[in-house]
Amino acid sequence: MKKYLMALFLVLALTIQTQAEERGDSGYFTLVDEEDRVITMTGRELDPGDHYIAGDNRLFEVVRTEADTVLVRFVETITLPTVTYEPLAQVGSATESRGVVGIYHTHNAESYVPSSGTESKDDGEGDILQVGERLASAMEEMGLTVYWSDNSHIPHDGQAYLRSRRTATELLQKNPDTLLDIHRDATPPEVYETEVEGVPMSKVRLVVGRQNQNRAANLEYAKRIKAVADDMYPGLVEGIFDAKGNYNQDLGPKTILLEFGAHTTSLEQAEQSAEYFAKVIPAAAGLTAATKAEAERDIGGGANRALVWLIVVTAVVVIGFVLINRGRIGSLTGFFRREAGIGQNEQDDDGESS
């Protein structure tokens, strides 16, 4: 039994720790397609098989990385789900539950250079906390119940998500309908600059970790968010990464990582986009009477597909148990380290991006 638990712990620990590596040299990667056209830029390292849904809904797959260039191939133009939403004023006047939202920050030291003169604050009191607080306040004004955590998870290293997992778990005890991890990216300013209704603000990028059992559900959730934003506030969403990582999204469906601008964005622009983005979440998450059933249908379908992932993990644990009994734990450990990308780049993530 002890050996079985050891195998289970090994599988889960490696799964949780698997996060996309992030640039630690103030650099960034440029995604370029087969026609040598720039698709976007990002501070996160990408692996072959990762996907990106661009602002115009073109889906790209990562082929390989060469220095600072990520080569991608066009797959298809996807169709986002049709999301029905009622007038926002009705959110606060609904007689049933108005919805519960949890907000936290894995990388709470992240800041915006134009506003603070630094990209990361050593004391952990980064500008990103103000973005999360602004998002929470805007949602509360709409009648939603919001639990916002400013817990510190410094340093910004490869173990930050393990530390923030405790915060996420605490927030889950409040039974939130959705759980949001608020970050900022690390790119040139033009990647995230936009205007919505004539107001300058930053774009928002959504990140789904493809190495967790809720990946399908959370990807559907991300598509719903983009669908609502594209309809209400065209240009607000930069795109969706479906990439290597877990980001604590194994804790449940409707958990998402949101990047509000980059370190080159001003805090004021990021806060402005948080104000607008607060109006997108209720419909996407199904927090209003008109959207609840629809959201459960879309996101629930992804949750059902997640059962396949659970079956696979269970099978792997059983295999691990057998290997341990046969004295082959070294082979098992090596297998998971290779699958998780651990050992390919042992450099710690030191805080340049989310």
Image: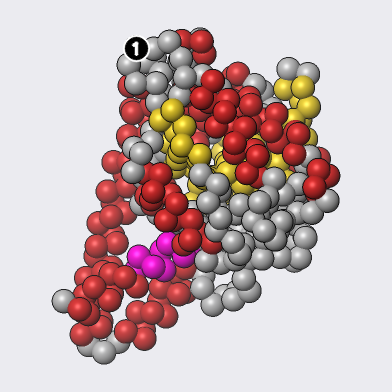
Which residue ends up furthest to the bottom in the rendered image? 327
Residue 123's image quarter? bottom right
SS of the residue at dot 1?
Answer: loop
**Residue 294 visible, this angle:** no
| Residue bearing the label numbered 1 | 95
Q: Position of residue 174 (x, y in %)?
A: 35, 39
**Residue 349 visible, this angle:** yes
**Most foreground residue, 220 or 160:** 160
Q: Is residue 190 magenta?
A: no
In the displayed structure, 113 sits above or below 153; it is above
In the displayed structure, 329 sits above or below 219; it is below
Q: Position of residue 55 (x, y in %)?
A: 65, 34
Q: Position of residue 113 (x, y in %)?
A: 80, 49
Q: Which residues are magenta?
A: 11-18
Residue pictured at 42% horizontal, 62% vertical? 16
In the displayed structure, 291 sits above or below 243; it is above
Locate the N terminus and report the quarter of the image it occupies. Answer: bottom left
Q: Residues within 10 Å of mark 1 (few under 14, many from 20)?
A: few
Residue pictured at 54% horizontal, 61% vertical? 160
Residue 339's image quarter? bottom left
Please indicate whether residue 181 sits to the left or right of residue 37 in the image. Answer: left
Please indicate whether residue 52 sits to the left or right of residue 92 in the image. Answer: right
Q: Position of residue 279 (x, y in %)?
A: 56, 22
Magenta span main SS: helix
In the displayed structure, 96 sits above or below 64; it is above
Residue type at mark 1 is Thr
Give the mark count. 1
Residue pictured at 60% horizontal, 18% vertical? 232
Q: Is residue 16 magenta?
A: yes
